Amino acid sequence: MTPDPTVRKELFKTLLLAAIALFLIPALTYGFVRYATQARDARFQQQVQDRTFASNASSDQKLAEIEFYRKRPPSSICSNTEPQAQRYREAACARYGEIWQFHTVRGVALWTLAAGATLLLTIGALGALAFASRKWQYLSFVLGWRLMTLASAAEVVLQGAMGVWLSFWITAILAERYYIKLIAVVGLAVLAGVAVLVTRIFQRARSNNAVDGELVTEADAPLLWRRIRQLAARLKTTPPDQIVAGIDANFFVTQAPLTVGSRPVTGRTLYVSLPLLRVLSVHEADAVLGHELAHLRGGDTRASALLGPKLLQYDHYVQGMREAGFTLVVYHFLLLYRLIFQLALSRDSRAREFKADRIAAKLVSAQAIVQSLVKIAAYSHYRGNTERALFERDHRLSGALGIAETVAQGLRPYAASDDFVDDMRSAHIPHPFDSHPPLSQRMRAVEHVVDSDDFGAIVLQAPETTWADEILTADAIEQRQWSRYEQQFAADHEQALAYRYEPANEQERELVLKYFPPVRFQLKGGAALEVNYGGIQPAGAEPLLPWDAVKAIRYNSSSFGDSLTVTLHEKGLIGAKSTKIKLAGLGKQKDSFNAAVGHYWRRHQIMRSQQ
């Protein structure tokens, strides 16, 4: 699979940012050390000459002494091993002294630059290993995960140390003074980054393996279970240990531990979609079931079950590096490896989809697998359109939403409409990281190509019998599942309305206040500041600062009392106007205050963009 231009652009952008993050601070450190040591060497040589010429030594002795120090400047003496330079070396290179520091930091900067280049090459090699085969894919990620963790820890510590060192020496040499506050700010940022890094290394990512559905026992669907066992026997694979039925527009198999309702299940699990089973004939559904069982036979689910938790843990670690400030120096190379690995994973997944399709075509028929794919794509697209239109409504949803009935009744008229073929063609364009190939490629792979103009006729074919009819508990499961789904859908929609409403009337205001009530923060002297959906209400008699007036916000920490600098959209004599809100006494409420300001301002921005 050749990455499309969008993916290539994303990879190049991430590679560029990774290189900048890996090399910027070490290169700056090395350059500054060279500048500072060259200047010191020149001053030292001048001092040697002045001292030597002022001495009573002979001309030959003076020239010899000048030549001795010219060949052995302070910048090189710490690495000099000549016996005649021992006293000079011991005097100049005292541990932790200025010359020793610059010599050590120069070496650290060079080694860090070399390590960064080696790391990028290693990421490329691990990526190539992941593309080699599925077996090497797992090995690549296990090795890559450990290496990326060690490399990120080393980079944060080394670049952090260089950052703190530079915060002292740059101002000390260029301005002949140092700034305790600057050193403290850089040091605290580095320590915070190290703390987050260590926490993320040992913190377990929360995995949500809950599946919305219900178990279908053999007593609930004896004929379906018998057919699945027959198909598994023909494929020479072990049948699933349990079947889960739900209303998601999807079929899948997995060997990962799951939670169905409140019950944990392990082993081989087959998930079947009841709404899709109702639109597929028995023959078409058999092809889909054969496709899923082919994944079990090929070891796809076992590989996914092994790799899935590790990917989740890695992503959790990468996300932590993005959010922790100084750890951004390692975020982009961690992301680069993840993108390359995902490309390899997606290529392998697509190959497995093609293979499963071909197995299903041999097991049942090529026509059956293609028709099932067309019907599944049509149902998913129409259901997505229906739910999207419902979610875009600007009033609260109440009672039964009737999504299942709307989709079931409207699918065939939709398939007969003029928009259907265009919609289906647009649905064929996958994201570069999708594991499922486009329908056109899947049809060619099983050598049964249907013209897109004939898709509607396939969807219009109503099956005489379906496997859903053979599941005794199907109606009850669907009723319970749709009821829960629609309740959650309505709740999500209501919360979305709280972001959309300005509000324009009392009813809308009531809903916005439900999710965005005023938040008060106590300040010094009993004063209080309020953050609400309209803006920031400073303490005292100052007027409300509306969100519409806000262009940017910056929190200022100070030992004399924190404050909030708000840049306004309004223009002043020189640039945009700004105002400062005093926050003396905010204390431990700082994080809650920043979170509230960001949350409420973000709501306002979303509301304006929706309008």
Image (tube, rainbow, N blue to C red):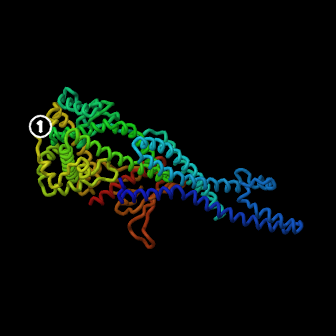
Pick the front one: 141 or 401: 141
404 versus 263 height, above or below: below
Name the amino acid type tagged 1.
Answer: Thr
Asked whether the viewer can see residue 483, the reply is no
Pick the front one: 583 or 91: 91
Can you give x and y, in whole percent of width and height, for residue 600 in the image?
35, 53
Residue position marked by numbered label 1 in the rendering: 465
Asked whether the viewer can see residue 309, the reply is yes
Disc count in the image?
A: 1
Q: Residue at x 87, y 67 (%)?
A: 60
Q: Residue at x 46, y 39 (%)?
A: 203
Q: Is residue 179 left or right of residue 377?
A: right
Pick the front one: 365 or 60: 365
Can you give x and y, in whole percent of width and height, for residue 341 in the image?
41, 48
Q: Residue at x 44, y 56 (%)?
A: 14
Can you give x and y, in whole percent of width and height, for residue 268 in the image?
31, 32
Pick the front one: 130 or 225: 130
Q: Residue at x 38, y 68 (%)?
A: 570
To which quarter of the image does residue 64 belong? Answer: bottom right
Q: Is residue 401 left or right of residue 238?
A: left
Q: Is residue 486 left or right of residue 568?
A: left
SS at badge 1 = loop
To which quarter of the image does residue 297 belong? Answer: top left
User: Callout 1 environment at 10 Å: few (<14), some (14 to 19), or many (20+)?
Assistant: some
440 versus 471 height, above or below: below
Q: Is residue 76 left or right of residue 601?
A: right
Can you give x and y, in whole percent of width and height, for residue 192 in the image?
52, 48
